[in-house]
Each structure stands twice: as structure tokens, then as C-alpha cells.
Amino acid sequence: MTAVPCAIALGSNLGNSRKTLQQALTTLAHCPDIDVIAQSSLYQTVAIGPPQPDILNACALLKTSLSAQDLLHQLLATEQHFGRVRRERWGPRTLDLDLLFYGQSIITEPALHVPHPRLRERAFVLIPLAEIAPHWRDPVSGQLIHSLCQAVDPTGVQPLGPISASS
Ligand SMILES: Nc1ncnc2c1ncn2[C@@H]1O[C@H](COP(=O)(O)OP(=O)(O)OP(=O)(O)O)[C@@H](O)[C@H]1O
Ligand SMILES: Nc1nc2c(c(=O)[nH]1)N=C(CO)CN2
């Protein structure tokens, strides 16, 4: 199978979030079927949902020979590895990994929706994603990421610099 370009979103607000996001990317890069092509800056973002500490967010571009379903399983296994526990919807998390795009595929299965259904309304996704994939076209809306990004309110999304920089 030829490698498919994909985009993922990363988030964390429990534990050492910067380190967790760095290590999660390293873990994914070590998977034999995944190449990490690009990573955005790190952002501190006001959490949308129940009151909780700010979230560190970033996005990355991958290339993978995995199917979308197998890539999702790898993302969920990586969340587990970093101690993800689901208590309340949109609650605090050690690591959240969302599959945003799998090439130009549109997938609507009970356990997998791609493109991620809420990405168009999320400044905490679109701002980091626009850094690394401004010309990626969303196959659902037909819009480019940089256009979708211009349409969201950037309030509450603060750049922190390179993800690999030490704090
Ligand atoms: N594109 C996708 N990326 C990640 N998970 C997905 C996707 N589509 C469906 N899911 C399913 O959603 C389930 C719950 O995901 P999770 O608890 O991480 O939601 P969340 O990231 O907190 O909220 P949101 O989906 O609004 O970002 C996962 O177990 C997975 O099966
Ligand atoms: N700022 C911010 N808010 C959120 C986030 C997130 O990653 N960042 N993720 C959510 C569900 O996954 C819900 N709310």
C-alpha cells in the first residue's frame, strides 16, 4: 500500500503536558508504518468544555501505510500508553490524539469519523494545522485549511514556540 498523508491533533492538560506531546510524537515516529513529516508549534489554549486547566495543543502531519482504522487503533493505543482515562466528555486528559484527515477520504463509521467532524469550528486545531498544512483541502467543505482558519475566533489560542523547546 502506498503511504497516505494524514493530519492529527494532539492535546494534553494533565501531568507534564509538553513532555507528553513530545514523547507521543516520538512514539508515533518509531512505529514502523508511520512517518512524522511535520509538527506545528505548541499552543496553550483555553479548554472548550467543562472548566479545567488550559490545554497544550499541537498538530502533526504523518505519512502511513496503515489503514485509517489501524491508524486510529495506533492513536488510541498511544493515548493508553500515556495513561489516558476517560471520565467525563471533554474532560482533562494526559493525552488526546484525534485523526483529522486521512488523505482526502471521507469515512463515516460508528467508531471513526474522518475528517474529524468538529475540526472546522476549533481554533485550537485550525491554528496549529494552518502552520503546517495551509493548502490542505478539507474534502467535506471544499475549503483550504488557511481559509477555515481565518473564519474562527483565535481568542484563547496562545503560541508557545517550538514543541521540542524546553520550558
Ligand atoms: N477522527 C477521529 N479521531 C479520533 N477518535 C475518533 C475519530 N472518529 C471517531 N473517533 C472515536 O471517538 C472516540 C472518543 O474519542 P475521545 O474520547 O478522544 O473524544 P475527544 O477527542 O475527547 O472529543 P472530540 O471527538 O470532540 O475531539 C474514540 O474512541 C474513537 O473511536
Ligand atoms: N482548548 C481545547 N479544548 C478542547 C480540546 C482541546 O484539545 N483543546 N479537546 C476537546 C475534545 O477533544 C474539547 N475541548
Image (cartoon, rainbow, N blue to C red):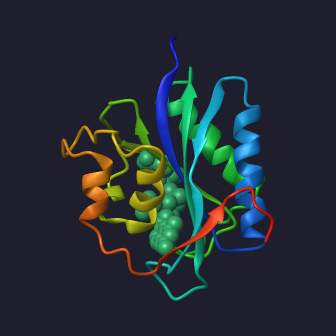
Evaluate whether residue 10 shows in this view.
no
| Residue 10 against residue 151 in the figure, above or below | above
Evaluate whether residue 42 shows in this view.
yes
Camera-side residue of 150 and 105: 150
Q: Residue at x 57, y 86 (%)?
A: 52
Residue 32 place in picture, x, y as percent: 72, 23
Question: In which quadrant of the rendered image does the C terminus lie?
Answer: bottom right
Q: Which quadrant would residue 29 be assigned to in this image? A: top right
Q: Residue at x 50, y 81 (%)?
A: 46
Residue 130 place in picture, x, y as percent: 41, 52
Q: Extreme left residue here? A: 142
Q: Residue at x 50, y 12 (%)?
A: 2
Residue 83 place in picture, x, y as percent: 76, 61
| Residue 75 against residue 150 in the figure, above or below | above
Residue 65 place in picture, x, y as percent: 56, 20
Q: Residue at x 48, y 46 (%)?
A: 132
Q: Which quadrant would residue 94 be assigned to in this image? A: bottom right
Camera-side residue of 85 and 121: 121
Q: Extreme top residue here? A: 1
Camera-side residue of 41 and 94: 41
Residue 70 placement, left or right of 124 = right
Camera-side residue of 37 and 78: 37
